[in-house]
Amino acid sequence: MDQSELARRYGVKPKDITIVEDLGVLYKGAEEDAAEFNRLIDEAVRGKHDDERWIEELDREFDVQEFITYMASQMILGNMDWPHQNIRFWRHRKYGSGRADGRWHMAMGDSDLGFGSLAGPEDDLFRRVALRNAPASRLLMTLLGTDMGRERFARTVLDLLDGDLGSEPCERGLERMHDLLAPEMRRHCDRWRKPSAHADWEREVDVMRRFARERERHVREQIARFLNSKAA
């Protein structure tokens, strides 16, 4: 997900797009945009937060709902190689239509070390994000320090769990992918030896099955516990 792909999707010029990644470093684009991004994060964290007015002001610079949805999705998916890396914010430097509106947006991706790859369905991503001193963590924790931010985040997490990231849709999607790949996997293993044998692949799929089946229950428990602690 680079400048060229974003430009293709949104009908703009690559040279007008800036991408900031990981701990707030410039990936592509203008240095002044990266400096502005980090200034906005610092101001958001240090600023005076009176819920609705502050979030409305922040929404002029960041797509707040998109950011909340992105963070909630990665946390539900259990991405263990994130948010201090494998994260990108982007903006179109000129004010156009749609997502090319001058605000900072999220580029979803690099989630391959989730879904049970490095941790089980019981792992607490809320605690992980809270402990990371990364721009995304700092901004989310600041939002969760307000009543409105907590309400929006909780509603977004629960909507995702009631929708495409709930147990049943994830299990169905996983089985569709398994059934599509299964006829080719023996030849793939014989040719590339990664995984070394078909049985090894099936064991890894079983890890993902457990994650898909159990993750929703744990996330619902974790968000209730986490938000209660923030509200106290």
Image (cartoon, grey):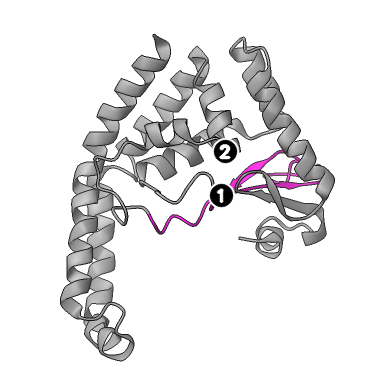
- Left or right of residue 26, residue 177 in this image: left
Q: Residue at x 44, y 19 (%)?
A: 151
Q: Is residue 20 visible to the viewer in this orientation of the structure?
A: yes
The residue carrying mark 2 is 134
Q: Nearer the viewer, residue 122 or 209?
A: 122
Q: Residue at x 39, y 56 (%)?
A: 113
Does 41 lie within the magenta span? no
From what the image shows, is residue 96 above or below residue 145? below
Q: Residue at x 26, y 64 (%)?
A: 176
Write the start and end of the magenta stretch as one range.
85-113
Quadrant (top left, top right, bottom left, bottom right) of the C terminus: top left
From what the image shows, is residue 143 above or below residue 206? above
The residue carrying mark 1 is 87
**The disc labelled 2 sits on which kind of residue?**
Ala
Where residue 21 appears, as percent x and y from the top left, is 63, 50
Where residue 131 appears, as percent x and y from the top left, is 46, 32
Residues at circles 2 and 1 in contact by the CB criterion of under 8 Å? yes
Helix, strand or loop at disc 2?
A: loop
Main SS, magenta residues: loop
**The disc labelled 1 sits on which kind of residue?**
Ile
Q: Residue at x 42, y 16 (%)?
A: 230
State the CA–CA distance, disc 2 to disc 1. Answer: 10 Å
Does 86 lie within the magenta span? yes
